[in-house]
Image (spheres, coloured by chain):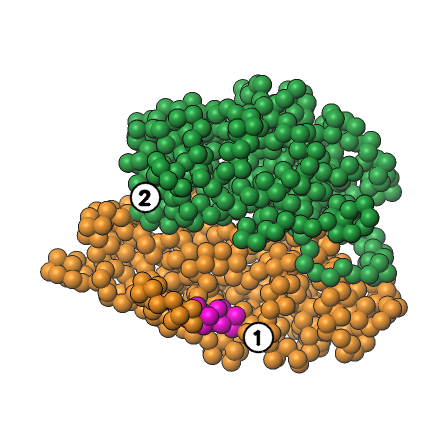
Amino acid sequence: MLTRRTFLHAGIACGALAFSGVHARLAFAALPDDRRFIVVILRGALDGLAAVPAHGDPDYASLRGTLALPQTGPNAPIDLDGLFGLHPSLHNLAEMWRDKELAIFHNVATPYRDRSHFDAQNVLETGGTAPHRLHDGWLNRALTPLALDTGNGALAVASSPPLLLDGSSHVTSWMPSRMPAPDEEYLARISMLYAKDPVLGAALKQALATRATANAAMHDSAGGPMPMQNGQGYGPIMPMMEGAGRILAAADGPRVGVFDIGGWDTHSNQGAGDGQLGRRLMMLDESLAALKTALGPAWKKTAIVAASEFGRTVAVNGTGGTDHGTGGIAFLFGGAVAGGTIHAEWSGLKPSALKDGRDLPAKTDTRAIFKTALADHLRIAKQTLDEKIFPDSSGVLAVRDLIRS
Amino acid sequence: MSLEGALAANRFGLGAKPGEIDEASRDPKTWLRNQLVRGEDSPRLGSLSSTSELATQLVKQQQLRQAKDKDALKTFLMQARQTYLREMAARFLVGFETEAPLHERLVRFWSNHFAVSTQKPQCALFVGAFEREAIRPHVTGRFSDMVLAAERHPAMQLYLDNAQSIGPDSLAGQRSGKGRNENLGREILELHTLGVEGGYTQDDVIALANILTGWSVDRGPGPAGPAGPVARMIHTAMGSEAENGFRFYPPRHEPGAKTLLGRRYEEGYRGGVQALTDLAQHRATARHIATKLATHFIADNPPEDSVKRIETAFRDSGGDLMKVYETIIDDPAAWRPEPAKFRSPVEYVTAAMRIAGGDRLAALDEKTVGPFMQSARAMGEMPFAAPSPQGWPDVADSWTGSDAVLQRVEWANAAALKLGVQSDPAALADAALGPFLNPDTRTQIARAASPAQGLALLFASPEFQRR
């Protein structure tokens, strides 16, 4: 897929201005007023009812059993509207809700209706209607109309881009590095060795450019290192989000970013308030706050979608966890978002309201949320969205009035 | 040094050691076949804890936790950490040293196919033993035996939550109100045997999960064992089975026969064995396994003819893996000179150490394995820590992101500096790549600013990254 296409692409582009700053700056002009768009893949199927409990639903406590949050105390949900709340670990997201920078979608699913993680992730990331029909990521396809397809435009916060950002358009990737930086002379010799290798040559060139942006973003104007937040206890997610936030905030930095965060497949001992999943949600929430801080003034121009491949069963399973389900949760947030709303089409938790008597139903297509950001925030034309980015999706409509004008 | 000799050492093996391409060049196919017959019997593997010892340790650990004996638990967890590091050191070292690199590649292929992962911390104690005792003994045997050994192993039982799965209508289920977990049942069908296109339904997932209720980690006959006349009767009716860390607990087993893919399976342990044996020999499994093996050895998008040949060998032999490997070794597509595969990070580090690591590596142990673990983590492939039950990806796309490539370039530099100068790097490059060494690369290596830089250029070179 990428390799072979990159091959051809790079072969054509190498002699041209593909990687030059001039080209990149011209490209960014196509994006209205420096907007940023970030996708957070919550890989592994986040339990929507854990993140956004329907604590006001009469059947919530009995069905959720040991997973139900208490109605009072430190582990009680942060109430949003009487019916829904946020998990107590998500206090930064709750603040964004109060600031009307967060819209929440419940009962969300891709068009995929079976329960394989890998097929569902494939649909989530390719933007297709069935697994393995498309071979590139929808966000990669979206880079072309945004003129962000020359390499510096989109950043995967990973060593290699996930499928979502993989495809014929060049993208870059970055991770906090743990290895000592080699000297320039060695890098020059390697660049010569890679000159005739389209895959390695293009990748190295791109990585060095991004590393330079990152280095600049991590230092102040006097060249001294800018201190990072103390992310102790928040796992590797926080340095990734804080570092990438600075790269995305840079004037000549990428405008699109992707995070790939796993650890949500809670089949056993999921816990309620401060259990296993609660701790993971806390790491995510604190890291998202670090991302917001790192983006600085660019936060106001940022829209972020966080989504998972599917939801989980409503009832607690035999091992204190939840199994693969259907309807899940998605968040649309950022300074550019006109939020403070929850979109659920709630039909309750009675078995008759559930899919196959076990899962939350699918009411909102995940693509509708992605389209909301792509159409209203990034101003991609409807026809392009319906045909190129999400093929055969003309019936899936963006949700209006969720992006600040 | 022949082209075929270099392909045998690099495409089929773990990267040439000095002299290996010469040796393989004499008769490449025989060199490969002999490795399968000989296997690997490194003394380092023999000195590690057995699964049953580890299962006993797990029980002890849980007792200490329940007794809230913090000091004893701390000592215990430190020992468990040492166990894990010893496994890790042995894993790296066997790769660096083995004289049967094809056999070792297959061990790793299957270990990745049946991925268990320290991402679930409960598994960490067992991941090394899983590869040594559930995968390794069956690598040249029958696939159905490997399926059985892998699904029964405590690492798999814990990783995919079956250890706690209880039939809702079983005696234990009725008493405790606890129930079934369908994770293992689903992944056996989707990942281990039929494949996602294998034509099964959600009902089949539940049927297999029911069939496997009662399969668990051996915690002794204990509280879930025979207690009272009813439980004893169930034991007698369903049969009991306990071996090397595995135990079947009849009181947790969902009563009654189950129907999986249209076939009926009797209740009890034997029904589960029969179900797994049938799945292992299913037509869809042959296709699924053939595609994965061809992708691993031949190309990211292997030729359909190659997949078909491997599939046929698998099906006609009832999953005799030696027959399957013979077919791959004899496949002309596997001997095409273009290097079609990109080395995974662990393959990459292993190839570098095989050519340039020298004798010092023999001292690798739990105290010195740290840097190798950090390297593997930085490049994105930590052994025993796959990101999901799907295992590590096996296509170049997953390893050639821009940052991934830079990480390798940085690692090549750091590793070469650490290894120091042992011999002429251009000569090492010849020994590593044989006819695949590009003359321009050789010139660059020979003209490097220092021998260490020459070695770094070899490691980072495009031809060393591929096989």
In the picture, measured across the screen, residue A155 lies left or right of residue B43, that is right
- Indicate the chain on which mark 1 is placed: B
Task: Specify the quadrant that holds the C terminus of chain A.
Answer: top right
* Count of marks overlaid on the render: 2
Q: Is residue A186 highlighted in magenta?
A: no
Chain B, colour shown: orange
Chain A, colour shown: green
Q: Disc 2 marks which amino acid? A: Thr
Q: Up-down: is B431 above or below A117?
A: below
Q: Up-down: is A266 above or below B214?
A: above
Characterize the local packing of mark 2: few (<14), some (14-19) or many (20 or more) Cα atoms within 10 angstroms: some
Quick one: SS at disc 2? helix
In the picture, measured across the screen, residue A278 lies left or right of residue B381, that is left
Quick one: which residue is furthest to the front in this view? A73
Per the image, the residue denoted by label 2 is A66
Please state the extent of the stretch shown in magenta in the rendering: B76-86
Residue at the image point whose x is 84% and y is 35% from the top:
A23
In the picture, measured across the screen, residue A366 lies left or right of residue A76, that is right
Per the image, the residue denoted by label 1 is B367
| x then y, percent, for residue B370 | 60, 69
Q: Is residue B311 visible?
A: no
| x then y, percent, for residue B419 | 72, 74
Camera-nearest label, 1 or 2: 2
Quick one: SS at disc 1? loop
